[in-house]
Amino acid sequence: MAKYIFVTGGVVSGLGKGISAASLGRLLKARGLRVAAQKLDPYMNVDPGTMSPYQHGEVFVTEDGAETDLDLGHYERFIDENLNKLSNLTSGRVYWNVLNKERRGEYLGSTVQVIPHVTGEIKEFVYGLGKYTDADVVITEIGGTIGDIESQPFLEAIRQISREIGRHNCLFLHVVLVPYLKCSGEHKTKPAQHSVRELQGMGIMPDVIIARCDEPLEDGIRQKIALFCDVEPDCVVENQTLGSLYDVPLMLHEAGLDAIVCKRLGFDAPEPALADWRALCGRIANAEKSVTVAIVGKYTQLHDAYLSVAEALRHGGYENGVRVNLKWVESELLETQEPAKVLAGADGILVPGGFGERGIEGMIAAARYARENGVPYFGICLGMQIAVIEFARDCAGLAEAHSREFAPASEQAVIDLMPDQRGNLPKGGTMRLGGYPCELQEGSRLREIYGEASIIERHRHRYEVSNVYRDTLAAAGLRFSGLSPDKRLVEAVELPGHPFFVGVQYHPEFKSRPNRAHPIFRAFIEAAWKQKK
């Protein structure tokens, strides 16, 4: 039977519950334990699939096609385990399931209530992940902040779980803010005290306190937190702000977090094997070279909208011994300003995924600039479609080329819906979601980069390269380097003879890891460094 760790947070959002949970997962896996992770989100959306990136950041897609919270990206990157549809649950999904069960008569006419029906649905989901993955330990993060009304059913559910499985099989980890007042030169513990009191009011006694702080904690402060929050002094673990996220597991290990967890849960596990992770952190700290990559998108004001892309670029840098500096470029700027001026200093240009027509012509201008000036270009999902549109207009004689998504009446829709997609466009879903196979063409740059002929990558889109124009585009010099196994769908394109000009319909950023960069990102950063030299 799996044992369960619940991670909560108080006072303010953005304390790094997800990073703390992911780091602990990495440490426990390094001790030889099977680890599964999930997040319970209190918002009423069924999933984040239709939420604005400005509100919620990126949508992270799992291999089995779940649209999930961005924290799941941290879990995958740190723990290096593929997550699944049981890894993210929202209040919207809970109530959706409960109401559907009520309509089907599964409650046999009972009055449907938060307790036991809503909490029961949550518990079923939490237990289900442990059974599905056969994990030794399940780490469950509760989204939001203690005291929020939306989180109460989740907190009640995990309280019940602790009673059902026994406290020896369950551990509560609470992340609190310990602010430092520069004017008086001291830390303050009141936010932590109030946060823990709220948690205790829900019937939950934390076992470990993770103290988020910008300055090292004095021993007296640690003792005070332990006294007022009713935990052992060694169970007050410091999580100090660091230069790199990937330093956090090592810091928490030095603070004894994984040892505390193993002791409390009864795991007889060896010391963690962290040599590779220490080597990774060494490469990050010691990188002397640098490149600048321009990310040209429509949500660049909120960097979390492209979180996995940014991290994957950094991963590519780690394997090349290069520090990657990101230049965030709002694509609309390129519609009114000279691309050479806006993109000056960029050693590589990346156009990420997205939806909607705002800023599209700016992205096309970025692709044109990269193609004409030999600047390494990497287009992801929409970024690939942009590259195809630009090439069609300027190189293939299709002056009015466009995407059916942005120009429904276009007579040269080089990006279009497939015939079997038309008339089937629900707002909350996409036609291709999750892992799909791709065949890389012999002799292509991509096949060389991957080192294999067949791959599986994650998708999140509904528009495709139109087969009507494939011959025209190929004759003009665009290479279709990746195709679906049945040859019907274009998965990747490239320009032969260019230093690096690659577009992929899928999202490789979701499968990149800090100690094992995705091969395309590794190759892209290598090309950017050569461009700089």
Image (tube, rainbow, N blue to C red):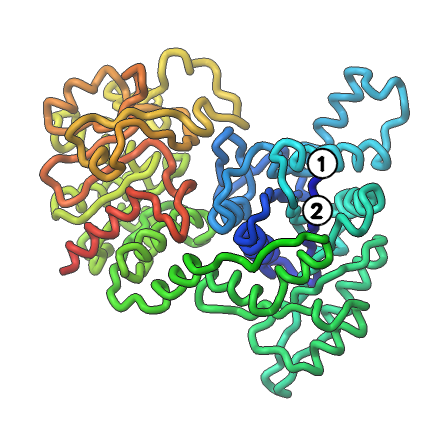
Query: Residue 4 shows which numbered tag?
Result: 2
371 is higher (above) or lower (below) than 316: above
Camera sees residue 440: yes
Which residue is identified by label 1? Answer: 127
Q: Residue furthest bottom?
A: 184
Check disc 1: other Cα within 10 Å, few if <14, some if 14-19, many if 20+.
Answer: some
163 is higher (above) or lower (below) than 320: above
**Coordinates of residue 455 in the picture (x, y in percent):** 33, 30
Residue at left 62%, top 54%? Answer: 269
Looking at marks 1 and 2 on the same chain, the residue that comes earlier in the sequence is marked by 2
192 is higher (above) or lower (below) than 348: below
Quadrant of the rendered image containing residue 471: top left
Q: For this rendering, which residue is in front, 500 or 56?
A: 500
Q: Is residue 498 left or right of residue 313?
A: left
Residue at left 79%, top 51%? Answer: 168
**Coordinates of residue 526 in the picture (x, y in percent):** 22, 52
Q: Is residue 193 left or right of residue 348?
A: right
Q: Secondary structure at mark 1?
A: helix
